Image: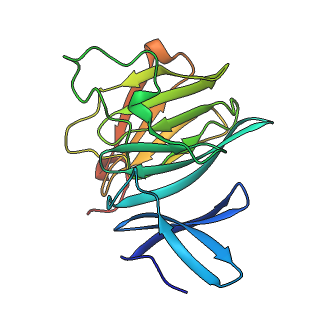
Amino acid sequence: MSGFEGFITDIKTFNDRLFISTFEGLYYKNSTSTGTEFIQVPVIGAEIIRQLFLFHPTRNRSFLLASTENGIYVVDQQMNVTRMENLVINPPEKEHKGMWEYSGWSLLQDPEHQNRLFTGESQLVGLEYSRGRWEEFMRVDKLPEHVQLQKKCIDKYGYFWGSSESMLARIDIEHPALATVKLMDQSQGLPSG
């Protein structure tokens, strides 16, 4: 068995196929009567994949999302691969800082709204899949530049939590247009970095 290169970062089964992400791209397992090999997904190339995420926005629709430093790749059930920025129907204006920040250390599906997804590094971006289309429904860019959201979760009260190496950000996402950000660090009891 061979065919993939680089440090393995994640592994998922999607559409009855095994996928492996590495520092050298995304690969899927191809088995035949003569053996098994891993084939690189050519659209993505040798980009470092940080996370593979199985996104199920509806009962009949699912996607494999590959998060990289440069964006998110969307793999559909027919194995079509497209960059998220090419699928979003309402991206921000070109002058917007970080307009294509559809990347991040991790992706998070909203537990209350299964068709919603959160991403971002130095800002929080909410994406929604509805009626076969992707739309940006929120963008919070009120975070200091040194804060990069590496880990993400939503608590039982509906607050989004994101962490950087030495800081937590709590974002009220109930009303996306009015999202408020509270930063917490050593002064609230977190350990020093």
| Quarter of the image where one finds residue 8 | bottom left
From the viewer's perspective, is residue 148 above or below residue 127?
below
From the viewer's perspective, is residue 37 above or below residue 73?
below
Identity of the residue drawn at 52% across and 56% down: 52
- Judging depth in this view, the residue of 69 and 36 nearest the camera is 36
Position of 69 with respect to 42 (left or right) is left
- Judging depth in this view, the residue of 178 and 14 nearest the camera is 14
Quadrant of the image for the N terminus? Answer: bottom right
From the viewer's perspective, is residue 145 above or below residue 30?
above
Position of 147 with respect to 82 (left or right) is left
- Judging depth in this view, the residue of 128 and 186 nearest the camera is 128
Residue 40 image point, x, y percent: 45, 64
Identity of the residue drawn at 59% across and 71% down: 29
Q: Residue 40: in sight, yes or no?
A: yes
Identity of the residue drawn at 35% across and 57% down: 45
Residue 53 image point, x, y percent: 57, 52
Q: Residue 151: in sight, yes or no?
A: no
**Residue found at the far right of this picture:** 59
Count of numbered marks = 0
